Image: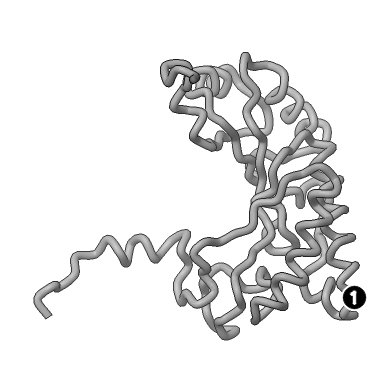
């Protein structure tokens, strides 16, 4: 049985950092925390050459190998916009009713990520579209359907295409946020943190 003393607490964490290159401060942070993974955002993406070099450095420069992750969905959540430009929207993918187009889009996304040494894509969104067009809950244009069957078919096909190209998918969000009326990135935690009148 492996001793717990050999397990660094950082292995349980995914962390982010700033910049499109590994600086001395970033290297120090990664060597100190030794995270199980790093997540890249738009702030880490400038040119294809730099992103490819960053992915290779994260795989090779440290005495451990963190998993490299990103959120790369489509149109609205497109971390690679600086490199690949605009992508298809879900409505573009679905308009002809051809489920294979969702898998093809997943494979295209997987090929983009694979060339940059990215292991995991925190996508697709599995939330149900349970809100109206005026609701600002950060999910507009990101949901694959209004029913479970619809989401399983379309988002599932995107997921299969992604994984066929060697990139692991990570569906989100759990619990589902499709019925939320606020943006959970900014407002729900503030709302929950407010003192509540428990008396009545």
Q: Residue 41 lies in what quarter of the image?
A: top right
Is 135 displayed left or right of 124 in the figure?
Answer: left
Q: Residue at x 68, y 33 (%)?
A: 20
Vertical comparison of 22 with 139: above or below? above
Mark 1, Cα crowd under 10 Å, few <14 / some 14-19 / many 20+, is: few
Vertical comparison of 70 with 152: above or below? above
Q: Residue at x 19, y 70 (%)?
A: 196
Q: Residue at x 72, y 28 (%)?
A: 54
Determine the residue located farthest toward the left in the rendered image: 199
Q: Quadrant of the C terminus?
A: bottom left
Render colour scheme: one colour
Q: Residue at x 84, y 66 (%)?
A: 102
Vertical comparison of 64 with 132: above or below? above
**Residue 169 percent coordinates (x, y):** 70, 51
Q: Residue 97 lies in what quarter of the image?
A: bottom right
Q: Identify the residue under disc 1.
A: 98
**Residue 89 percent coordinates (x, y):** 78, 69
**Residue 8 percent coordinates (x, y):** 46, 22
Determine the residue located farthest toward the top in the rendered image: 63
**Residue 136 percent coordinates (x, y):** 52, 74
Question: 47 or 137, which is in the foreground?
Answer: 137
Q: Secondary structure at mark 1?
A: loop
Determine the residue located farthest toward the front in the rendered image: 1
């Amino acid at each position: 049985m492996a001793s717990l003393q050999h397990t660094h607490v950082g292995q349980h964490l995914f962390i982010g950092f700033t910049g499109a290159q590994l600086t001395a401060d970033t290297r120090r942070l990664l060597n100190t925390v030794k995270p199980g993974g790093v997540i890249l955002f738009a702030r880490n993406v400038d040119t294809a050459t730099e992103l490819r070099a960053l992915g290779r450095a994260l795989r090779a420069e440290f005495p451990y190998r963190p998993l490299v992750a990103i959120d790369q969905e489509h149109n609205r959540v497109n971390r690679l916009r600086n490199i690949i430009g605009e992508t298809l929207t879900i409505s573009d993918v679905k308009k002809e009713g051809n489920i294979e187009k969702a898998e093809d889009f997943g494979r295209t996304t997987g090929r983009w990520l694979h060339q940059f040494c990215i292991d995991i894509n925190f996508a697709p969104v599995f939330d149900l579209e349970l809100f109206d067009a005026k609701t600002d809950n950060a999910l507009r244009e990101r949901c694959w359907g209004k029913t479970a069957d619809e989401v399983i078919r379309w988002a599932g096909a995107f997921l299969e295409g992604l994984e066929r190209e060697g990139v692991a998918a990570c569906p989100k969000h759990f619990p589902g946020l499709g019925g939320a009326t606020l943006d959970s990135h900014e407002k729900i935690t503030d709302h929950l943190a407010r003192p509540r009148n428990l008396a009545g």
